[in-house]
Amino acid sequence: MRPGVGCSGLNRPARHRKLKAGGERWVVMRPVVEGMGLAWQSQNAKLNAGSDRYGARNDIVTRDAAGREQAMTCMPLKRYPLWLVTINPAKVPDPAVRQRVELYQDASAEALYQFWATGSATVETVAAVIRESPQNGHPAVTCRCPPD
């Protein structure tokens, strides 16, 4: 497993710096983006252009790796899944991470379908459908990441 990559193959915000500001949990996005092998410049532009959609802010001050204070691009943790489904898997260079992005996107689509069609979606019901769907092209993978 590459440094900075969570057990799901995606950079989970739990593995990176999170902070609280204004009573909300935020994810520092640059380490997440670069850990997935994506270009920070284009993702930062996407986050800033869609700041109403993603809730990204550039005015949250945190410390960098050297301990210096600086403003970082951060996203509310509750909006992080929305951003992940917008990633183009073809642009993720690492095949293992790309597969996990695709699996996440399939699971997200299933969860939204279940929620809107039946009024309920759980990890168990979504995982069961994803495991039973040979057309999704993903092997049956079970990965339980440790809680925050």
Image (cartoon, grey):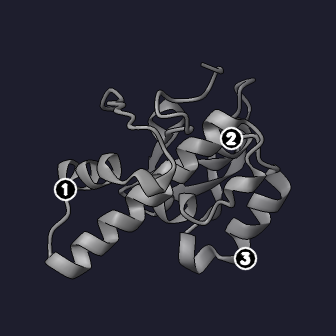
In the visual, does 90 lie left or right of 25? right
User: In what quadrant of the picture does the C terminus appear?
Assistant: top left
Q: Between disc 2 and disc 3, whose residue precedes?
A: 2
Instruction: Report, in whole angstroms, how far the alpha carbon at label 1 lies from the one at label 3.
Output: 32 Å
Label 2: which secondary element: loop
Left or right: residue 24 compared with residue 31: left
Q: Local crowd at mark 1 within 10 Å, few (<14), some, or many (≥20)?
A: few
Question: Mark 1 against mark 3, which lies toward the viewer?
Answer: 1
Of the two numbered discs 2 and 1 in the rendering, the one whose residue sits closer to the viewer:
1
Residue 120 placement (x, y as % from top left):
15, 69
Residue 23 can be seen in this image: yes
- Is residue 52 placed above or below 138 in the rendered structure? below
Q: Is residue 62 visible?
A: no
Mark 2 to mark 1 CA distance (whole Å): 26 Å
Q: Nearer the viewer, residue 87 or 125?
A: 125
Q: Which mark is residue 142?
A: none
Instruction: Find numbered disc 3 in the image and state the secondary structure of the residue it sits on.
Output: helix
Q: Label 1 is placed on what type of residue? A: Thr
Residue furthest front as drawn: 134
Task: Check disc 1 and report the residue beneath it.
Answer: 122
Whether 26 is drawn above or below 15: the answer is: below
**Residue, disc 2:** 36
